[in-house]
Image: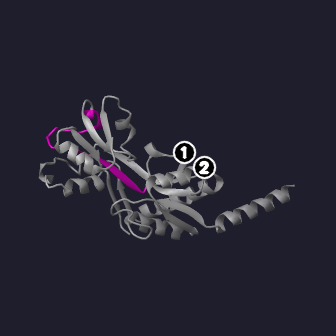
Amino acid sequence: MKLITAFAFLLFSHASTSETLMFGSYYIPELAINENQGTFIRLHKEIMRRTQTENKLLFMPTKRVQHEFKHNDLISYFPELYESLPKKNAVVSEPFWLKNIIFYSVKDMNIQSTFDLEGLKLGAVHGYSYGSEIVNNKKIKIFYTDNDDINVKMLLNGRIDGIIGDNKSTLAAVNKSKFKDKFIYDLNKPINILDVFYVCQNSIIGKQTCSEITDAIKQLKSEKVILLNPKTGHSQIKI
């Protein structure tokens, strides 16, 4: 009986390491442009090379990626944050990036932390993560819209006090505005810093995959290919 069990385990292990694993990702300006371009995509290819993982990367809208993962059609996807985990029992990798939450306004309000946001009306985008310290604080009034461009217009019209966003897509929306000189923000002083990682299925193959990804990320950090500073939110991937 033990011999049969051991043989079955060997067969399962062989199948799990030789099959093509399905990964998912979605568009983020500069970081994930398509299945072949972007800083995160180049990093993913390097991680797959180091882990010797046979994989196929599916590039889809964010909600579609999360839907496919929920229905077990993806072994893993990236990037993700704790606030947006699609499954409570999903496993995650070592962080490979830090998402900085920046406060944008047209008045000097001296916002230093998430607590300073209490009592303010803030613009945010559906589907984006800002950290539980912000979204679960009932003293902060958050108005969700479809994109940062809408929030920029709302702020300029005085309908909100500020925008919470990142230093990529939100900044791009601000810079597109013909009134961009009116905006006040400090990219070097984020009000919140969030870990960014791979999320994997809570299965034998999923756990193994996330473990191997974590080992590769730690190796890349030791080689200073990935540089993260949790205190300042500085992130850099030299690849």
Q: State which quadrant residue 3 falls in.
A: bottom right
Q: Mark 2 touching mark 1, by CB under 8 A?
A: yes
Looking at the figure, which quarter contains the C terminus? bottom left
Name the side, left or right, on which 144 lies relative to 198. left
Magenta range is 94-117
Residue 189 visible in the shown view: no
Q: Which mark is residue 202?
A: 2
x and y, in percent, of residue 13 in the image: 70, 62
For the view shown, which residue lies furthest in the right direction?
Answer: 1
Does the magenta-highlighted stretch encompass residue 104?
A: yes
Q: How is the image coloured?
A: one colour
Residue 103: give x, y in percent of width and height: 24, 44
Please state which of residues 222 and 143 is positioned toward the viewer in this rendering. Answer: 143
Residue 235 among magenta residues: no
Numbered badge on residue 87: 1
Of badges 2 and 1, nearer the viewer stands: 1
Mark 2 residue type: Asn
